[in-house]
Amino acid sequence: MKSNVLWIVKTAIFLAALVVLQAITKPFGPIVTGSAVNFVLIATTLTVGMGSGLIVACVSPFLAFFLQVVPLPIFFVPVIALGNAVLVVIYALILKKAVNKSTGAKLFVWIIAIVASSALKFITLYGGVNWAVIPMMTAIKGAAVKAPAAIFSTTQMITAAIGGVLATLVVPPILKAIKNKKY
């Protein structure tokens, strides 16, 4: 019971931190905000686990929308949640398989995890936006809606990679330091 409560608390802290971080970094543009979001998604996955990472990945876009952090129509929010989920799952699965086969993940495994998860998030977002959301919005509004599509271009892959690199560099040493701490 105690471990379930701790898991819920950790997940809630990461979710809250992500929404606050989006609001704080919004004035700095999509590269900074996107990188921060992806950092938190991967940090959550590394520290609490894939299940927690998935919850943060899927719930945070809806919270950001309802708190007006994301200035996009609601149609984009499920696609963003799906892209975030793909990032978390691919990253976690690659690392889990590598860690289970050896004493720890080697540098090339971390790189593969970052590149693969970033590329698949980009493909998910790009495809979802350009092949589902924009055609649906065009049908509803009667005119092509192309401006939001630019947000879901290669910028997504870049911000996912930046967030992944930062989380990969920062989180494991912190976890190791906490584990070795004597009270």
Image (cartoon, grey):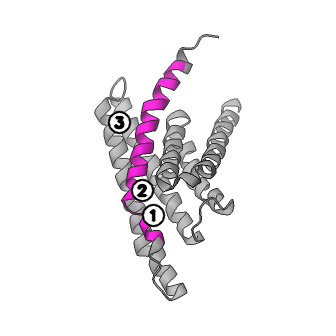
Mark 1 and mark 3 lie on one chain; the one further toward the N terminus is: 3
**At 42% across and 56% down in the image, what residue appears?**
156
Mark 2 and mark 1 lie on one chain; the one further toward the N terminus is: 1
Q: Is residue 160 magenta?
A: yes
Of circles 1 and 3, the one toward us is 1
**At 50% across and 64% down in the image, what residue appears?**
79
- Local SS, label 2: helix
Question: Horizontal and vertical percent for residue 86?
Answer: 44, 53
Q: Which mark is residue 151?
A: 1
Q: Which mark is residue 156?
A: 2
Which amino acid type is shown beneath numbered disc 3? Trp
Which amino acid type is shown beneath numbered disc 1? Ile
Which amino acid type is shown beneath numbered disc 2? Gln
Say if mark 2 contacts mark 3, CB within 8 Å. Answer: no
Q: Which residue is mark 3?
A: 110
Disc 1 and disc 3: Cα gap in Å? 26 Å
